[in-house]
Amino acid sequence: MKNIKTGIIGSGFMGAAHTEALRRIGGVEITAVASDDEIARNLIADKYGISQRYSDWQEIINDPEIEVVHNCTPNYLHYEINKAAIESGKHIISEKPLTISVAQSEVLIKLLETSGVVNAVNFNYRFYPLIQHLKKTVDENELGSIYYIHGHYLQDWLYYDTDYNWRLEPELSGESRAVADIGSHWCDLIQFVTGKKITEVFANLITVHKTRKKPPGSIETFKGKEAETVDNNASEIEVKTEDAGSVMFRLENGTYGVFTVSQVSAGRKNNFMVNIDGSKKSISWNQENPNEMWIGYREKANEVLLKDPSLLKESAREYAHYPGGHPEGYPDGPKNMFHKIYGFIRSGLDPRKVKPEFPTFKDGHIENKIVESILKSSKDKTWIKV
Ligand SMILES: NC(=O)c1ccc[n+]([C@@H]2O[C@H](COP(=O)([O-])OP(=O)(O)OC[C@H]3O[C@@H](n4cnc5c(N)ncnc54)[C@H](O)[C@@H]3O)[C@@H](O)[C@H]2O)c1
């Protein structure tokens, strides 16, 4: 099998996660990493034996050997890099959100009408074995008709007003924070599992900390919590994006639901919960305990399904790499997704003609429309059509 040559842009939390996942799928040679952070760039390159190190991401686009680009940069750079990759004929795997506005993602979708490059957005949570199993369960009508969908995505890494990250700056992150950052995963997962689009939303978003203390240096994603002292040189800045909020939604088939997002919920680390209540049974799944799915009944005792290939729907088995009782987790989602994407690239198929089994830029564009509708709804205090 010929190695596919790949370049990674960004050397932070996700740059490292993509690199590690790619090393685990095989058949991919990461030839270059680009980042404006020299120390982190060298750390990743040394650890994974990557020969080229660039300070300017454009070098990855200009490198004729590189066939695939992974965009793991802050949100505001997604548009420019994704666009440059498409225009140079390179396959592109972008972090979410696809861009920071619908206007931007529309341009990318238009460009892809005349380009056959493989494009993907890292909605990695689809790729847990139990989520794939759940999707098949819903497809086969085992839940019956769906009465209600509810859940949340809660974190605590921005709990204090001294917690800081580039995501707090709209110029770098976009006009939505909690919704675009984590709510987008929740919406994508629900649309994936049910096969139905979110068509209407009614949202109430809140900013708990109206100001925050910005330290002079940058802080790595999720790492602020590990700081032992508060930086006395921090400057007070106004916060313009939401810390938390709830969104009621309607799916295209008329099903209603609600979800809550928060980055200020003490003790909740990456608490991504999905509940689907059907006429035959209910299910509940939480990303912090991803190898179990709760199944609820009224007439008999409830059940817990453990991730065990022998107990999963056949179509979900390929996503479970170990036997039951051997937990699989967060790093396995991107690995499963990249496996599918690189398989597609290797097959030479055109994503305009054959629908890929992974989330594409179209899904990222849809997500952007949901995020903008949620912002508008919270502002206008009314239902908004997506
Ligand atoms: N899918 C997921 O589960 C998931 C999880 C976390 C983050 N993300 C997404 O991944 C992206 C990156 O987030 P992160 O948490 O890794 O952030 P991060 O701050 O940890 O990493 C960002 C990286 O981009 C680099 N960078 C910044 N400006 C650059 C430039 N001009 N040229 C080259 N490199 C530049 C930084 O040096 C850093 O290495 C975001 O879009 C975020 O939404 C996705």
Image (cartoon, grey):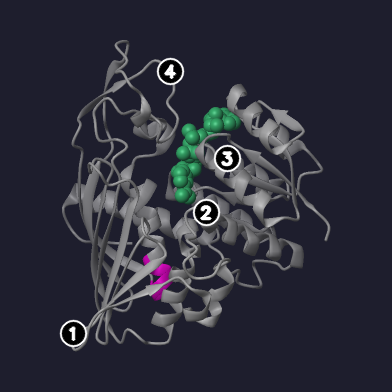
Q: Nearer the viewer, mark 1 or mark 4?
A: 1
Q: Is mark 2 within 8 Å of ligand 1?
A: yes
Point out residue 11 in the picture as x, y percentages from the top left corner.
58, 34
Q: Which stretch is magenta?
A: 190-196
* Marks 2 and 1, the one that precedes in the sequence: 2
| 192 in magenta | yes
Q: Nearer the viewer, residue 152 or 200?
A: 152
The three-letter amino acid code for the residue at tag 1 is Arg
* Marks 4 and 3, the one that precedes in the sequence: 3
Q: How many discs appear? A: 4
Q: Nearer the viewer, residue 138 or 318?
A: 318
Structural crowding at the residue carrying mark 3, measured as other residues with C-alpha within 10 Å and reported as few (<14), some (14–19) or many (≥20) = many
Q: Nearer the viewer, mark 2 or mark 1?
A: 1
Tag 1 residue? 298
Point out residue 151 in the picture as x, y percentages from the top left corner.
26, 62
Q: Is residue 98 left or right of residue 246?
A: right
Tag 4 residue? 217
Q: In this view, does 34 lie to the left or right of 225?
A: right
| Alpha carbon separation for disc pair 2 and 3 | 14 Å
Structural crowding at the residue carrying mark 4, measured as other residues with C-alpha within 10 Å and reported as few (<14), some (14–19) or many (≥20) = few
Regarding mark 1 in the picture, which secondary structure is present there? loop
| Alpha carbon separation for disc pair 3 and 1 | 45 Å
| Alpha carbon separation for disc pair 1 and 4 | 54 Å
Query: For the view shown, which residue lies furthest in the front direction?
Result: 325
Regarding mark 3 in the picture, which secondary structure is present there? helix
Q: Is mark 3 within 8 Å of ligand 1?
A: yes
Q: Does the residue labelled 1 lie within 8 Å of ligand 1?
A: no
* Marks 1 and 4, the one that precedes in the sequence: 4
Looking at the image, is 371 positioned above or below residue 306?
Answer: above
State which quarter of the image contains the C terminus.
bottom left
The three-letter amino acid code for the residue at tag 4 is Gly
